[in-house]
Amino acid sequence: MNTFFAFFAAFVTALVLVPVVRSIAIRIGLVDNPDAERKLHTCPIALAGGVAVFTSMVVAMVLTVGVQNQWTFTSSLDLFDTPWLVLLGSAIAILLVGLVDDKWTLRGRQKLLAQCVISMVIVGSGTMLDVVGFLGIDIPLGIFAIPVSVLWLLLCINALNLLDGADGMATTVGIFVSGSLALVSLANGNAILNVVAAFALCGALAGFLIYNRPPASIFLGDAGSMMIGLLVGVLSMWCSHKETTAFAAAPIAILALPLFDSLAAIVRRRLTGRSIYATDRGHMHHLLNEKFGRAGTLWIVAAGCSVSSAAAIAATWLHLPWLAPLGAILVLAVFIGTRTFGYSEFRLLAGRIRHLIMSFLVRPQVCEHKKHERALSMQGDGPWQEVWEPLIDFAEQQQLASVKIDVNMAWLHESYHATWRSIRMPEPAMQSVVRIPLLVNRGTGEQAERVPVGRIEIIATSSPDSLNRLGDFIEHANEIQIQVERVVEKVEAMKQARLKPDNISVDHSVPTAVQEDAFANIS
């Protein structure tokens, strides 16, 4: 009964509190302005929704504890235990960090440092993973308990944070995650306050969704998404039926979608040579919104969360631990198999693994001459082969060790990555490396500016001859830039005309005049 009271108390409180917080946020200028690059909205939207969610949750918890204990706070529900004081204090701390970031924008490493400190405070207070359960088998972590616990909290914080890029996205996921954790905690015979807190968070998010659903009038902001990630990370560590924290597959299955989005972002950026802090429009919410629209995105996410969460809850109630990972794998397989999300990252990873395997199988006599090529349109369908194919021809003729191109234009939903390299690369000390940025004009008239959209990297074995050839390549870098601009113009034309790429006739068998000028003298 207390759990349902906590849910409805948080829901009603959020309905009343969110408009107040929204009005204050707009008045003090705490808003999210569109940038026409990654953000999907077209006008400034109020932030600080996380403040309303957290306050609603705490109010509901206090009311529930008060009703249960008849306002004596001496019964089974005690908010003043050390773990809860640490958790609520840490949630306030991460809210403040997020508010500073929402208002003035922090660097990625600054936010990460603050997250690490807050996570270590929680772990240092005694909340840590002592045992990991996998399919009914308990694996003690021993000395790895502290770093694994901190890493888990960081993953949860950033998973929800990265997912918060479309109207109602992180809120919807948070509702399913917190509600499922509440039911799993209930099934495991957890402390009732854990269940109350999870249901209170679920109710607060449900009330907030009324204002956050498309078209949203207020966002969670970094403050809200990081706070929710921290709370669900700790609650998932607490949803155990043992004295020691035995972390089973159920919490991971419940958090399958946000964790998958974070993992995909890491794979995408690391394997394309981009910074881990780089921004792009390859997150789950961007791709789903482009394919299904804003309302459709929420339905797809809700369906995925429903399946993975139901499997986790069933695994706990029926004592069948294999059901939880099965449900999560099923959801992720559908996303990848239908090319809805994760397909490009899967191909990137598969290509890297294939290259690694080939490096063991190729005979030493031919490994220096054997080449590995991978070209992948990660997003969009621009004719980037018009730039890439002449680069390969040049690399083959000049016997280069590697050539790579990486393009990322978030505002056009366009991302392309291609590599051509020897199975056996020269030692780093013997590599001559040339990197040139790819720049295009963005805007018109006085608003026009040259913006970076990617880079080309060429590697050759160090020798006087190879240096001369790389010098020739640099001399003709301007022609390559012109060809890149022509491809960008085609992409913009396709976008404006809303045409599919196969409706535009491109003759790839005959090089364009720019291609001939750019590579004739190099060859």
Image: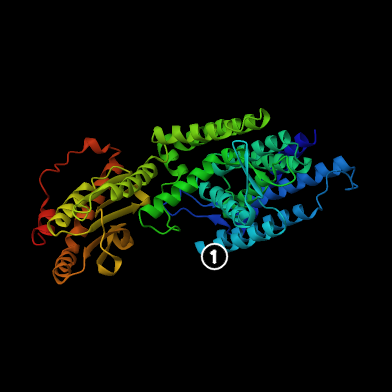
| Residue 454 in which image quadrant | bottom left
Q: Residue at x 88, y 43 (%)?
A: 69
| Residue 325 in which image quadrant | top right
Could you say which is closer to the camera, residue 136 or residue 15?
136
Does residue 210 appear to the left or right of 198 in the view shown? left
Could you say which is closer to the camera, residue 522 or residue 322?
322
Amino acid at the residue labelled 1? Gln
The residue beneath circle 1 is 110
- The answer to whether residue 420 is above or below residue 101 is above
- The answer to whether residue 319 is above or below residue 220 is above
| Residue 115 in which image quadrant | bottom right
Q: Label 1: few (<14), some or many (≥20) within 10 Å?
A: few
Q: Residue at x 41, y 47 (%)?
A: 282
Which residue is situated farthest in the top direction here?
318
Q: Exactly how many numbered labels are in the figure?
A: 1
Q: Residue at x 25, y 68 (%)?
A: 430
Q: Quadrant of the C terminus?
A: bottom left
Residue 210 seen in the figure: no
